[in-house]
Image (spheres, grey):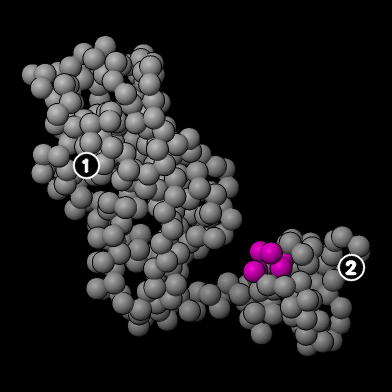
Amino acid sequence: MDQHLAVFITVAEKQNFSRAAEELHMTQPAVSQYIQALERTMGTKLLERSNKYVHLNKAGEIVYHHAKEIVGLYGKMHYLIDDLTNNPNGLLSIGASYSFGEYVLPQLIADMQKKYPQIKPAITIGNTKEIAELVLGHQLDVGIVEGQYKEKNLKIEPFAVDKMSIVASPKNRLSHIEGEVSITDIEKEIWIVRENGSGTREATEKLFNQLNIAPKKILEFGSTQLIKESVEAGIGISLLSDWVIRKERDFGSLAVIKVKGFSLTREFSVVLRSPFQTKALSVFLKLLKGQNEKADKQL
């Protein structure tokens, strides 16, 4: 019966069977069957139907009011039972931008699988704009994005500060300059940047504005890994997260270029759509905070 009530609540709020079906990832005939079954159980019609919209009648308003309370209590009951048994489980869909998703998230997922093997993570990697839109569309439970992304219908909470560095091949002429290089020096270089919509691209544009430079040649690549390998190959220079270049910096395959007057940081943020959290999501967010503290110590 809880499923019937959940479907009824969605139809009442969307005022349309098609939109409710889309929200619930169901077919419209299936939604209609749930509503009809609930009306048979209640012994009366609950909705007034027109060509495009449906509206609650008096009986529907009563059922809607109590259904919201019942579904809320049902969800709370399950949450408390999970808490009691300390047994978080089920599918958790996680989205992350490239920098975090490819270089920090894997260790976090490994830790989560060791401690909570019944949680089944599904990972989506994309640029900041893509991940935020998937969360907004209820296709992801949680997203991790870069930069100053804003969307009024999303809850966006910064959880980590990421330092950015200009990097070049050890064979690049800038790598052999002692001390800091000049702004003019880096302006003359070929810059390799991410695509529009990426948090790293946003940070790069911020750098250009901060230093008031306009590089003559810019190459746009859609992958952070491709940019790293291209910089290593000597094609050009780039701005990347310190988390992303940690191994290359330690192995000496990438050199950090120090520039006069340059210092740039950005935020990594958690993106949520629903104010309600499953046990699995709560566990992930707790581990995320711990992973951030661990990563900070390694940099």
Residue 165, percent from left and from top? 24, 32
Between discs 2 and 1, the one toward the N terminus: 2
The extreme right residue here reads 50
Residue where numbered disc 2 is placed: 49
Picture quadrant of residue 14: bottom right
Say which amino acid is labelled 2.
Answer: Arg
Residue 76, percent from left and from top? 50, 74
Magenta highlight on residue 24: yes
User: At x 62% / y 77%, what residue is drawn?
Assistant: 70
**Closer-to-camera residue (2/260):** 260
User: At x 14% / y 39%, what residue is drawn?
Assistant: 253
Residue where numbered disc 1 is placed: 245
User: At x 30% / y 75%, what residue is drawn?
Assistant: 116
Label 1: which secondary element: loop
**Closer-to-camera residue (80/282):** 282
CA gap between label 2 and label 1 equals: 59 Å
Residue 12, percent from left and from top? 76, 66
- Residue extent of the magenta highlight: 20-25
Mark 2 near mark 1, Cβ–Cβ under 8 Å?
Answer: no
